[in-house]
Amino acid sequence: MNGAGKTRLKQKEGASLIAALFFFMLCGIGASMLLTSASVFVGAAHSESAVNQKRLAVESAAAFLRDELMREENTVKILEVMVEDSRESEVFDEVRFYYAGSAPEELELELEPESGWQEFGFGADESFLDSYIRARYIPMTEIREDLKLAEEEKQLFFSVQAESELDSETLSQLNVRVRLFMDKDYQITAILSDMQTDEEHEEDRCERRLIVPARVWSDTDVIVETDEEMDEMGNMTDEWTITTTTRLTTICWERGVIEKEFSGAEYGWEK
Amino acid sequence: MDGKNKKFLDIFQRKLNSEEAETLAELLVSVLVTALGLTMFAAALMSAQQIIVRGEGKLSAYYTARNELESEEHGKEAVLILEEAGQRTAIGFSADARMRGCYLVELFSDSEDLLKLYRYSRLERVE
């Protein structure tokens, strides 16, 4: 501070106007701080509601998917029958996929008579589990150590329609996009994102990861039949073996875990 | 710097360096400026108070709505639709091809439907 300023501060006369101006400036700063903090508080209260609606939408969808996958009806049975005839070079191998869940009787579905299982894709297009299981299952004839399965991503969209008194109303704030992956152990990973956030504000997007582990077990049964052909003299002219291998694989999904923190880089994109 | 500004700066400099007392007019202006400052501060204080009261009302309504959502008292039936590439699809076992990709859910919202907060949980499959 220069000499004139110090003198001005120390003298006991003629400071009214400068002091008043300083006081005015202080009042202005104080008032603007007050208004800013009050506005921030109200803004936070308002955005809290929107942020929570995104979270509720994503978490509802994650919990729904988790509960649906756990259902007993979605237990998958894979029946593979491989027949090797020593007289033939080619091996017969048939794989059939079923859901172990039983349908309600009134629907009169044509279920497998002996098992009560429903074959994949019955009466409709394939569901997303059908196509994933078909792609992930490796038949006995194709098992190789170096076999690598391609990573396949599926995208699903969840929307909710509420029945109002007049018509059905789509609740757009509950729309959720789901990216699904299934690994070779049939574990399902779903990344759920809200559809309210626009692409320019990716940092505000609400996302959750659902990991649903699978329990897989197999029963294999091998029957070997040996047969022979005799000529008229009773001499053996031909002998062959038919080996029938039946493998029944059961897959069911356990209660999944919904995670808040995860890295998008694991899935090839930045969160 | 143009002549007008220079003149104003000179007056301000002179006033700052002067050891003379203020005139009555200057004193009155000082009082006026002080009063204006106080009025502005008081108005801002009152506005801030009103804003905060309004914000608290909103927060209170929000927490009431959240409690109602969690208590699951106001549930109604709704349909969750699952789509893949624009086509309806099922998760797995599909009991009824006609209702493929449709799942019954229980939709919860706040009782007065003011905040438009919704969540849902799974109900039995459409049969």
Image: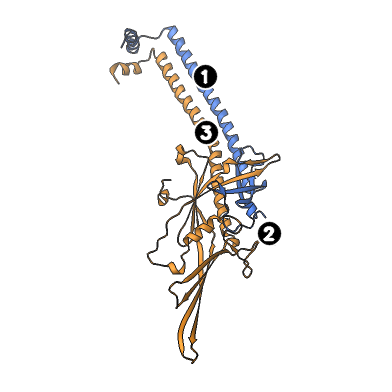
Residue A176 image position (x, y, % from top left): 54, 45
A162 versus A182 height, above or below: above
Q: CA distance from mark 3 to mark 2?
A: 54 Å
Quadrant the N terminus of chain B occupies = top left
Marks 3 and 2 in Cβ contact (< 8 Å)? no
In the rendered image, what is the letter of the chain coloured orange?
A: A
| Colour chain B appears in | blue
Residue B21 image position (x, y, % from top left): 38, 9
Marks 3 and 1 in Cβ contact (< 8 Å)? no
Q: What number is the disc on residue B39?
A: 1
Q: CA distance from mark 3 to mark 1?
A: 26 Å
A101 and B76: which one is in front? A101
Label 1 lies in what chain?
B
For disc 1, the neighbor class at 10 Å (few under 14, some 14 to 19, many from 20) is some
Q: Secondary structure at mark 3?
A: helix
Residue A52 image position (x, y, % from top left): 55, 42
Q: Amino acid at mark 1?
A: Thr
A31 and B72: which one is in front? B72
